[in-house]
Image: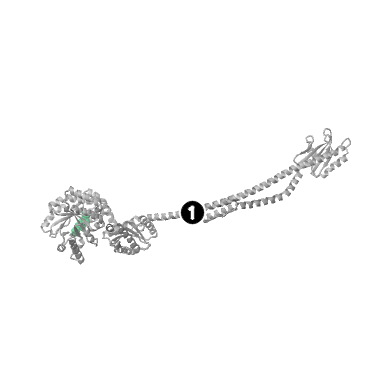
Amino acid sequence: MIFQSVKSTLATLTISIIIIVSFSVLVVSIFEHENLYQKFVKSDLDGLSENITNDLVPLIGDTRDVFYITTVLLRLDHYENVKFAAVLTPEFKPIETYIGKANIPSEDIDYYFAKYDLNKTPFGISTNKEELISFKYIGDKHLPIGYLLIINDYQGPLDRSKLSLLKQALPIILVVLAIMILFSLWLHNKLLSPLTRLSLLAKKIENTKDYSLRVNVEGKTEVASLSHNVNSMMQAINKETQINAEYTLQLKEQRLEMEKLANYDSLTGLSNRQHFMQKVKKELEDAEREGNNLFLIYIDLDGFKAVNDTYGHDAGDKLLIEVKNRLQKIIAKESFISRLSGDEFLVLMDRQTSYLSVEKVAGEIVKELNAAFLIDGWKVHIGASCGIASAVDAEFDLGDFVHHADIAMYSSKELGRGRYTFFTQEMKDNNKRELLIANSIMSAINNNEFELYYQCKMSPDEKIVGFEALIRWHKGVLGTVPPDEFISIAEQSGKIIPITHWVLEQLCKDLPKIYQLFDMNTVVSVNLSAHDIRSDGLLEFIQQLFIQYNVLPRCIEFEVTESAYLENFAQANAFFTQITNMGASVALDDFGTGYSSLSYLTKIPINTLKIDKQFIDDVGVSDDATTITKTIIEMAKQLNLRVCCEGVETQLQADFLIEQGCYQLQGYLYSKPLSLDKLGDLLSLECNRLEKV
Ligand code: C2E
Ligand code: CA
Ligand code: CA
């Protein structure tokens, strides 16, 4: 573009210069012609008037021959530019006058005499733009006998002469001008054509963005060198462009990689929390606008932690990938799966999903994740607890939507895991209560609202051999809150450790009273939760308490549920090894409810198996429960473990269990948990062979 305009400006400039020069030449020649013309007519007139004056000398004297004078003047007829002539006396009186061919009819003799004041007219040849005036002496200059005045037209002939010059010269000038212009244009083109080609190349590159284009211009060294330089520049640009393209590609890949890192879980490749939440937010907005419902499934794996602890983190990772594969098989492509964290997954069902179909999918998830996984040659069992929420219930609020699914998932856990549950408003109300409970725990400790109750454990010959310390919370603003409820809330809200500390210290304080009433060999057990095992410093706390309160470790037993132990296998092993080394004993609580693999029993430092109440309930009623109980007792004997049966409510159950070789019995048949003050009552009961309380 710029080049094109430079080129046209250059051409215009050249043409203008040519025209100006041509016309200057014309003007100068006209001017020169005028000069020459003036010189020529002056000398011509001078010669003519000189001749006439000479011829007049003999005719003007004493006798004037007017006839001859006229004849002499008539010679002026040959000169067509003469306007007027007069022969004058020395006193400037006309002797004879002559009107020439160039005279204008209206200008008579008087006109000329009026126009020229002869006293002021210079002698010789003079001019006044319009006319040439010749004023000559006749005779001797010092003693003239008369004068000759000739007035010659000057401007008219000059104009005509100029016109004729123009008429002759102009066509030639114009032809020359045209030739010069054409020539200059041709020259321009010739000189500028390489530049034109370079310009076209630039234009083409601009349009095609093809930097591999080249131009080949020969000729003038400067232009050829320019073309060469342009080509080199193009080569450099092309190279740079290629490098840039590679760099851009690299950047694009890096950006994709970063996006992937930012939005996807590196282990499973599923969307991460942030990415998933963005998607759910948008889907909720769309669904609300279109009047559709949406379903969300919250999946939490059961027993995943135990797999991590038992088989290692690599196996845990492989298991998570397998879980993802199974989920992807069950869930339609249109649905959206995310790994929220650890062993938690979320599934946003596609828009077409109905209540029935989400239920079906959730059922399949539970079933599929319950089936054994083959990881590193091991058959690994886990399960899944699912919670289902609907967008309508959550009023299309993202936070509520996810929270509802979470609440429903917890409900599945509470109901015994390995199942799915739909969210209900009731769950949310409970959740509010949970929050209230969680927030009241610390003040409950500070305000002494907790109390320890003790439930006795009986030997087969029905003597009190031990107690289980069970916490109670009566005095709070919430009234009586059962431990089943607040213990799990305390665990979830991270407040179980202060509770355990309180229980342990209270037990130490209560022990002297217990030993006042009962045998010094009586063992009191205390419950520990999974969080306690994982916490730092509990062992030191216990050791310090035992020293402070003078407690014999052999009098204390720690109960830990089978699931809490196995989910924290490595830590639990380390912790309970030290507990047994101190001389205290360990019981595996709620045995039989969680894990089918019994092989681990030989590897852990425990003394007692507490068979869960659910088996004891059905002893003598269900063949399965009876067989399981018998088998556990038998197996325990072989493993050198004692068996405590909890939840014994009937004499029939007690008789059966005693017959099978159960080591200890605990249950309402003997006593409910009692406050320390009431423990004395058990003495009389014991005396009466422990009749039912
Ligand atoms: P658990 O450790 O399995 O305790 C036994 C539960 O069974 C106690 O319930 C006890 O009262 C109840 N029980 C005993 N015999 C019978 C019977 O014959 N029939 C029936 N129906 N129930 C019987 P409790 O005291 O309500 O405690 C419930 C759970 O709360 C405990 O289960 C334990 O897991 C937890 N818990 C209680 N106190 C503490 C504590 O101090 N620390 C920790 N970490 N957990 C505790
Ligand atoms: Ca227990
Ligand atoms: Ca138990």
Residue 147 picture quarter: top right
Residue 41 picture quarter: top right
Residue closer to the observer: 659 or 313: 313
Residue closer to the observer: 182 or 662: 182
Is disc 1 surrounded by few (<14), some (14 to 19) or many (20+) residues within 10 Å? some
Asked if one can make out residue 560 in the rendered structure from this viewpoint, the answer is yes
Name the element at disc 1.
Answer: helix
In-image side of 258 versus 593 (left or right):
right
Q: How many marks?
A: 1
Q: Decide: is 545 above or below 427.
A: above
In-image side of 225 versus 632 (left or right):
right
Amino acid bearing label 1: Thr
Residue at the outermost top position: 142
Q: Decide: is 137 above or below 315.
A: above
Q: Which residue is mark 1?
A: 241
Q: Quadrant of the C terminus?
A: bottom left
Residue 605 picture quarter: bottom left
Residue at the outermost bottom position: 623
Asked if one can make out residue 5 in the rendered structure from this viewpoint, the answer is no
Q: Position of residue 240 (x, y in %)?
A: 48, 52
Residue closer to the observer: 21 or 219: 219
